[in-house]
Amino acid sequence: MANNQSFGNILMVGDVLLHTDIITERFCCDLEACKGQCCVEGDAGAPITLDEVAEIENVLDEVWGDLSASAQAQIDRHGVSYVDREGDLVTQIVGGKDCVFTCYKDLPLGEGRVARNCCLCALEGAYREGRTKWPKPISCYLYPIREKRLGGDIIGLNYNRWDVCRDAVKRGQALDMPVYKFLKDPLIRRFGEAWYEELERTAEEYLNQRS
């Protein structure tokens, strides 16, 4: 049984502290509107771990042809990762913005709709096509949740607000999709099914207390 506690706007599920915004806010990606700008905007790459660097290097040959010439040159010169000015290990970027693993494609959305010239992750694309067995860094998979290690075995999770995701907020509100439900699969990948089930119970208890 996880240890569930409430500290104002913070809930504790197991060894994870999470902000209640993850339960109360709505979010659902809208690639047709945003075109995948979260892979482009910003001044650093995606946060990754040393284990994820190894995973990327293992699938690099498979995704190499999907990368731009500039991205290939950047990786040839500097590798797949670097330490940013805040001391975090992140993926390499091109031109001061694009993650080296971005690629631009038209993305079918169903019902005849297509997101034109959408910025996609080459790592995830290869995984979805069955060419690799590893999807992408967990920091990307979990977004808009950001993870931070707080010391010892305690992990903190926050909902990160970003203007480029305003369309995802609108869609999430229209669909009544809480952040934690939208991110069910990545949260299970990161913390396990038992933990996520405990999160669901914690969320229900929290919302019942608020009503």
Image: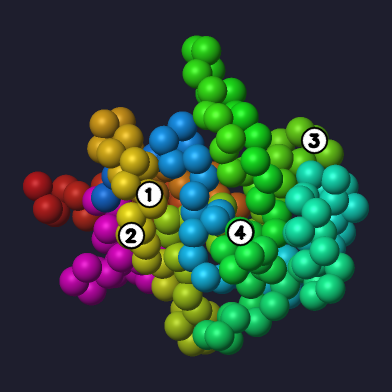
Q: Magenta part of the protein: which range?
A: 1-24
Q: What amino acid type is highlighted by mark number 3?
A: Gly
Q: Which disc, if any, is residue 98?
A: 4
What residue is at 52 percent from the left and 70 percent from the top?
A: 43
Q: Quadrant of residue 190?
A: bottom right
What is the C-alpha distance between the residues marked 2 and 4? 20 Å
Query: Percent x, y for residue 29?
Result: 43, 40
Does 65 sit above or below residue 16?
above
Q: Is residue 48 visible?
A: no
Give the mark nearer the N terminus: 2 vs 4.
4
Does 2 sit above or below residue 164?
below
What is the C-alpha distance between the residues marked 2 and 1? 8 Å
Q: Nearer the viewer, residue 150 or 88?
A: 88
Tell me if 37 is positioned left or right of 203 in this view. Answer: right
Circle 1 sits on which residue? 165
Circle 2 sits on which residue? 161
Q: Quadrant of residue 34?
A: top left
Does 126 sit above or below residue 81?
above
Secondary structure under badge 3? loop
Q: Dot 4, crowdedness within 10 Å: few (<14), some or many (≥20)?
A: many
Q: What amino acid type is highlighted by mark number 2?
A: Arg
What residue is at 70 percent from the left and 54 percent from the top?
A: 101
Q: What amino acid type is highlighted by mark number 1?
A: Cys
Circle 3 sits on which residue? 130
Q: Are marks 2 and 1 in contact (CB under 8 Å)?
A: yes
What is the C-alpha distance between the residues marked 1 and 4? 17 Å
Q: Are marks 2 and 3 in contact (CB under 8 Å)?
A: no
Q: What amino acid type is highlighted by mark number 4?
A: Asp
